[in-house]
Amino acid sequence: MPSLCRFDPGRGAALYEEIDTKLELLARSLRQRYRIDRIILHGSYARREVHEGSDIDLIVVGDFPLRFHERPSLVREMSDLPLEPLCYTPAEFAALINAGNPFIAEALSEGREL
């Protein structure tokens, strides 16, 4: 289980600084290990609206060696953060965008690239 499975919103800026640093390290590690096109942080953490039960929502687009349902574990094993990654190949992600998927559209509009 991730060591930061609960957030303490009372920590304010210090909480975000710690997690942002870990997210940048994760992004760098993912790019070194896999051919990553994009990493998009979205959801409550991206909006800076975390609460005690929040997780960190990521969309990771790249060439992965596993099937769709197996890919998130590749990301989770690289961090102690409470991550909820969705991992797509570039073709899968492009198809979702082209189809006008509302979840992807919202993640792209509210999220930020790592």
Image: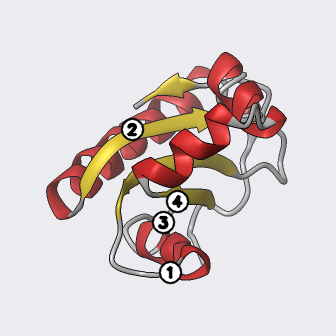
73 left or right of 50?
A: left
Q: Which residue is mark 1?
A: 67
First in sequence, mark 2 or 3: give its number.
2
Q: Quadrant of residue 103?
A: top right
The vertical placement of 67 against 99, above or below, is: below
Mark number, residue 80? 3
Q: CB under 8 Å between callouts 2 and 1?
A: no
Name the mark on residue 87.
Answer: 4
How far, Cα to Cα, is label 1 from label 4?
A: 10 Å
For label 4, count other residues whose C-alpha is less than 10 Å away and answer few (under 14), some (14-19) or many (20+): many
Q: Which picture quadrant has residue 89?
A: bottom left
Answer whether labels 2 and 3 touch (C-beta < 8 Å): no
Indicate the quadrant where residue 85 lies: bottom right
Comparing labels 2 and 3, the label whose residue is closer to the camera: 2
Give amino acid for label 3: Asp
Q: Kindly identify the amino acid type of the residue bearing the numbered disc 2.
A: Arg
Crowd rating for badge 3 (residues with CA inside 10 Å; few <14, some 14–19, many 20+): some
Between the residue at mark 2 and the residue at mark 1, the CA separation in whole angstroms equals 18 Å
In the image, residue 92 lies at what x, y percent? 54, 54
Helix, strand or loop status at disc 1: loop
Q: Position of residue 21 (x, y in %)?
A: 37, 37
